[in-house]
Structure formats: structure tokens, C-alpha cells
Image (cartoon, rainbow, N blue to C red):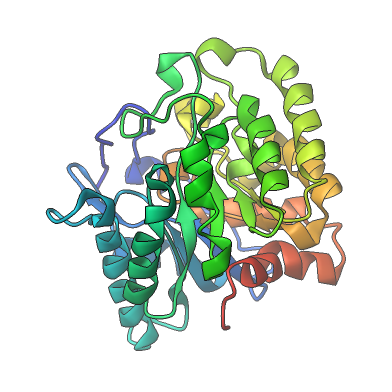
Amino acid sequence: MSTTPTQSHYLPVRDDWLARRTETILEPTLPIVDPHHHLWDRPGWKYMLDDLLADTNSGHTIIATVFVQARSMHRADGPEAFRPVGETEFVNGVAAMSASGLYGPTKICAGIVGHADLRNGAKVRDVLEAHIRAGGGRFRGIRHITAYDPDPVLLNPAYAPPPGLMHDATFREGFAALAPLNLTFDAWLYHPQIADAIALARAFPGTGICLNHVGGPLGYGAYAGKRAEVFPVWASAIRELATCPNVVVKLGGMAMRINGWDFHEKADPPSSDVLAAAWKPYVETCIEAFGAARCMFESNFPVDKGSYGYAPFWNACKILAKDASPTEKTDLFSGTASRFYRLDL
């Protein structure tokens, strides 16, 4: 059944359209950790365990996944700061279902990235410790979305981060609570903000940071039709960020409305060859800058599902990695994710 997002920020998922594309699975036995997906039950858009399994069981060998915060199943009451702990409780329950073996060999939600409002400063430690207790040994870190741009059409209405949040003193006071608890930070921001991430990484060299979605190169709103102008700005910032040894990057998440691609407007979903060609400059730049040992492919499902199916996505990743050495390929598809999120596989 097709679904309609609750916010225009997302592209709608059309199962009948996705079904128009089937592909032979490339390298079907290659072990993959999908380090970035969501689970939610929203009005008009449900993506729960069965939906995820339908994707992860579509032909590739997905050995484990990492859940990343999505405002899912927050507690309905209690102190505001602790409500996101409900998401960790929910996801740990899904992980426990998977760990039973009843749903196949994939370790679903083997790692959990939740949310805590770092603007609570040092007091956020109590929230982080509550997440750790709720996570059943699977809680690995937080994501506090900082994605901001002056163009309002680029802002997700579900989040309202102010400009310059990563420089805010109270935010940084909260950020300082992560490393002592052996927690990492997932950074979701737009490409003009990569400089802010560089400053944050240098201020906290002992905290692991994962840049989501290759740093959010924008191609919509004020950036529409400016891909040739945006790319060198983005690439320069990526190379500078790569000088921070505590940062890794996720290769994926480039098919959202904000990225400006038109895959969803075509009669048929894009092939893996089309996707690989579109993403090659971005993926190659990241791998050249960070090295395969600090890069990981990610699905960003179901968000990116408005543009393509799960099986063609991973085929595209395998095309992009076809010239990688065996060690590099292992890092890109499972090793980097397993190390960064400390997965027991």
C-alpha cells in the first residue's frame, strides 16, 4: 500500500511504483551492516519491524542494523527531557524480538542511536544514563539534529534548530557528557554547516562523531539548479572535516527532497547504475578524504524509499565499491559501522 508522509519534507513511498524495478542481486553473500534506518508508526506512514524485514530480506545479506532516532514512540508524559527515552525502550524491544531468532538471522537494531536535548547542558547526563539503562546493552549514542538553513523550505517542520547550535555553550556543555559515558554523536546538518561540525570535532577530539548523509549537500529551494556550484564548496568542507580523526561519514541519505534529485518524478524507479552514476562524485570524494576505514554505506530507510527500493540501493553501493580491495570493501559495508557502533557480531 502506498503511504503519504505527514510532512511535505519527505517524499511519499509508492510501493506500486517501486515494484516496477527488480534487479539481480550483486555479490549476494557480501555481509552488510545497515547503520542508518528508522522505525515509526505515524499517521499515513508506518515502517515497523515487518516493513524493515521485507526490505532487509530482499536479497542482500544484511547481518545487522543500527536504528537512528526518529521521534518514534516518545513517552506521552513525564519530564520533557526524558520523553525520548521511550524511543530507546521501543527499539530495544524490537531488537529483543529480533534476537529471539524468530524473525531471521539479521540482528535488527543491534545498535541504537537515540535523542537527548544537549541544550539541557550538564543535566543531560541523567537522560543519557536513562537511555543506557533502557537500551539493554545496545545504546550507542545520540543524534541531536542541527540542520538549519535560512531558506525555510529546507527546514523540517518537526525540528526547529537555531542557527549556530553547534557553537552554543550550553549545547557543548551537554555534548561534553557523551565521551565519559562512551557514547557517540550522529551529526545531521546541511553542507553549509560542515564548518560548524569541524569546530565541534576539534573542540571534542575524544568524542566519536558520525557525519550523516555525506554532510547534506543541498539541491532544493535556494540551492535548486546549483549542483555545480555547491559541489566544490561541499567537497572542500568534507576534506577539511576528514582531518579530524574522531569523525567518520555515512555514504547514503542523498535521495531526500532537499537533495534535489528527480528520481521520484520518473515513470520507473532508478536503476542501481543510475544511482551509482549520480552519487559517484560524492562517494569517491568522501572515500578519498576519509579512507574506507572511516566510511560506511547507509540506507536511510524509509526516508529514502520515496526515491528507490532497498535492493537496487545496495546494488548501487556495490557498483560504487567495485574497485575497492577486499579489506576496503569489508570496511565500507560492515567494518566501519561495527567499529564505530561497537557491534557484537
Residue at 82 percent of width and 38 percent of height: 239
Q: Is residue 39 visible?
A: yes
> Horizontal placement of 251 versus 244: left or right?
left
Q: Nearer the viewer, residue 178 or 72?
A: 178
In the rendered view, tell whether residue 111 sits above or below residue 311: below
**Splitting the image into 4 quarters, where does residue 27 fall?**
bottom right
Asked if residue 93 lies left or right of residue 79, the reply is right
Residue shown at 34% from the left, 40% from the top: 14
The quadrant holding residue 84 is bottom left
Task: Compare residues 230 and 84 and report the one nearer the observer.
Answer: 84
Relative image position of residue 141 (x, y in whole percent): 49, 62
Q: Exactly how many numbered labels are in the figure?
A: 0
Q: Position of residue 336 (x, y in %)?
A: 69, 66
Judge whether residue 266 can be spotted in this image: no
Q: Nearer the viewer, residue 105 or 298?
A: 298
Residue 183 is situated, as x and y percent measured from the top left of the image, at: 53, 65
Seen in the image, is 200 located left or right of residue 292? Answer: left
Give the left or right position of residue 285, taking residue 80 as reference. right
Vertical relation: 148 (above or below) 64 = above
Q: Quadrant of residue 205?
A: bottom right
Q: Residue drawn at (52%, 19%), measured in percent from left and top?
A: 220
